[in-house]
Image: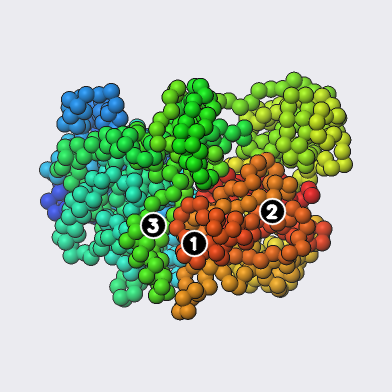
Amino acid sequence: MSTSSFFRFALTAAALAGALAASPAQAQHAFADPGATFDPRVPTPALILGYDIGARFTPQRAMMRYIERIAAASKRVKVDTVARTFEGREMLIITISSEANMARLEEIQRDAKRIADPRGASAGDIDAAVKRIPSIVWLEHSVHGGEASGAEAGLALLYQLAAGTDADTKLALDSTVVLIDPNENPDGRERHTHDIERYGSSQGVASEPGALNNAGSWPGPRTSHYYFDLNRDWYAQSHPESKGRVSTYMKWWPHVAVDLHEQGSSSSFYFAPPREPDNQNNPKHLPKWFDIFAAAHGAAFDVHGWSYFRREGYDSFYPGYGEGWPMLTGAIGMLFESASSSGGAVMRNDGTLRTLKQAAFEHFTAEWATVKTSARRRTELVRDYAAARANAITVHAKGPLRAVMLVRDMQGRADSLVQKLRDNGIEVQRLTADVAVANANMYAGGTVPTMTAKAGSYVVDLAQPQGYLAKALLEPDAALDSAFIKFELELRRTGQRNRFYDMTAWSLPLAWRVDAYALSTVPGSLALVTDMPRAFVAPARSVYGYAFAPGSEASIRLLASLLTDSVRVWYAPYSFTSKTNKFPNGAFVIRAALNRADVHDVVMRRAAEAGAQLASIPSAGVDEGTDLGSNSVIPVQRPKVALLGGAPVNGTSMGFAWYAMDQRIGYASSIVDANFVAGGDMSAFNTLIVPSVQAGALDRALGDAGRARLADWVRNGGVLITLDAASAWVAQERVGLVRTRVKRDSTRADSTGGAPLPGSLPGVLARATVDTLSPLMAGILNKEMPVFVNSDRVYTIPKDLAAGDAVMRFAPAARVRISGYYWPEAAAKLGGSPYLWTERAGRGRVIMFAHDPVYRDQLRGTMPIFANAVLLGGSY
């Protein structure tokens, strides 16, 4: 038996022996209140798991077995699989209530939906539903895989509610429906438990913070399969975990939502109220309930003499958090942060040992207090929720921003944005006829006194039950409280760290590059969108071939799939017209005679799968523009893509690129590490993507010889694509590939004469100007567009770059800001600097993005540019 196997066996056997020897009163669960009683017919955690909750981490397989056994033994429990992760693990939602409530769950759901959408119901109907419905409590556990104590607490709460027979439990069951998401991030948490098992010892748990059982392996367990932070994914829903979670949430419309996390091991425990800034769209009843729940949480902690804090450290500004998104639906969204035990036991700064058992105990105590408070104040809680849902309609009916109009485009971005809004429960309508609109404020800037809105355009009326969320996601700029800004400027003046916890700009029309207008009234001739248009219409078979326009996600997927299938594709740099089909610069052409015998069938099948618009081309001779036999029409070289991963690469940046390749573009990439790049055979690849990475760390990982080998690979024809901080790495003189340099006078430069300033822009949207003739801009019809900025880096590029190589620049300082918070000197530093540019290096090319174009899968407007860099970078 191996040491690690012995370690697991010894722990399990000892815990099981202890559980079997204990008296019934001691053997229920480790965190039970004094005097709590339980139904002996429901198996205890120790009996199922072989150890008390908190004695060790529970891996996914054991968690699933535990939930299955509890559900089989208790009529109070129902388990549903709502999604599967990218690695195939089940996502569960557990519903728990009294047997009487479980027998009428469909009725409760109908009441919940009626309260959540009061339109068409009388005041008496709503009041009756409020009086008879239990409060609905949604509990989320361990969205960050390494913050694992939350999931252990959730298992304890499941047993408490499934087996408890005391008065507190009976009241909770009668007065609430509790929905437990037991493991929000199964893939990440499994990485964590794997590291714990892999680095475990028969001599006990290593408590030093640097031990691998505590520090973990790259990229750490926090994130999903694609290394996304799922606590930022509630509205983007890039992952099946998020889609399944939100879809289930909207079947219940909970009144309370709690998200269990961990923070630094030397901290105490955080619970709401949050600190500023809050999202200005949050419903006004939230502070009252933050105080009510905080009093209950504090009282529960005071019983044990535990420390806690409130109103500092964590804000509620960004709408994609696990507690922030529910707030904007009217629920009392709350964050819990327990001090982490890392690998199960870690030494704190004060010399005390932080254990998994204590972290889980605190989480259990806080969420059990939440359930009991929700039960005791059921009617008041539900009534306030009902009022918030109704207020979402009336408040926005009178607001200056009444509606947002989204103009349909030929590339499908508006369509996909509308589907995303509908995935968030937001109603969207479609204009059924052309209508006149007055005083429309363009998201791009400026006001149109009168305009004709075309039939087919989308309109989001904010006077709807999801109006708070709709406004938060759609408004051009998220407002920040002036007092908060004043305090931030004072912190900045004195050289202190800013308090922005996340990005400050996310407006979906801007991030998706959709032409949008803010309206003060709702135009007429509207119909509710209930389904989305299907794009593909099969063209006639053509002897010469086919063509499709660039720029849409569908066309990107089509190009990628054709290259994967070894179909030869040509790039036409200039616009042309064939019969009735007009194509912009950068269209793609398939010449049937120069392709595989079954090319017609392959192209049709792939176009249908991608949903792309495909046209038959009868001849190389076109009606307008450059003929398709011209030497300017060049073959697209099939990219063979390597993606740099592993230490020291930033895991989330690598994940964003990996996700874009897999899920948006649909093209294979091989993940390689720095050791392979430095010493392996790179001849199998012609394209290398380097995600964000700290320059010095990558230099050390590659070494001088590895850096030289990489430079030779590029000069011999390789395409190097650098993202975000990786562009600062390649801009070093010692790398020897480009003449670009990081500008010394960056936004971190001190304009006050004091200490250097913390200058990173906190996730803003900036205006960039576009050279539309570059192949990297194929399908980009905008002369200006929003891009995301999340750092302080500014670059200088050679003045003699070839035409089209300075692809995108930030607009001048006076116009660069679009959305988000800019430090006073930031616009002047950023204005006019490059966002995307390329330099030749021998027969190869380096393509540099100053910032990340595929950040969190939320920048659907710039994703096609990244796709062009990958798919076309080696073809011109």
Q: Earlier in the sequence, mark 2 or mark 1?
A: 1
Residue assigned mark 3: 147
Res 587 quadrant in image: top right
Res 182 quadrant in image: top left
Q: Residue furthest bottom?
A: 754
Please report the residue visible at 45 percent of the width from the left and 39 percent of the height from the top. 518
In the structure shown, which secondary structural element does the residue marked by tag 3 occupy? loop
The amino acid beneath tag 1 is Leu
- C-alpha separation, residue under disc 2 versus residue under disc 1: 22 Å
Q: What is the x, y in percent for residue 874?
A: 77, 50
Residue 150 circle label: none
Please report the residue visible at 31 percent of the width from the left and 46 percent of the height from the top. 282
Residue 807 circle label: 2
The amino acid beneath tag 3 is Glu
Q: Are marks 3 and 2 in contact (CB under 8 Å)?
A: no
Dot 2 alpha-carbon crowd within 10 angstroms: few under 14, some 14 to 19, many 20 or more? many
Q: Residue furthest top?
A: 540
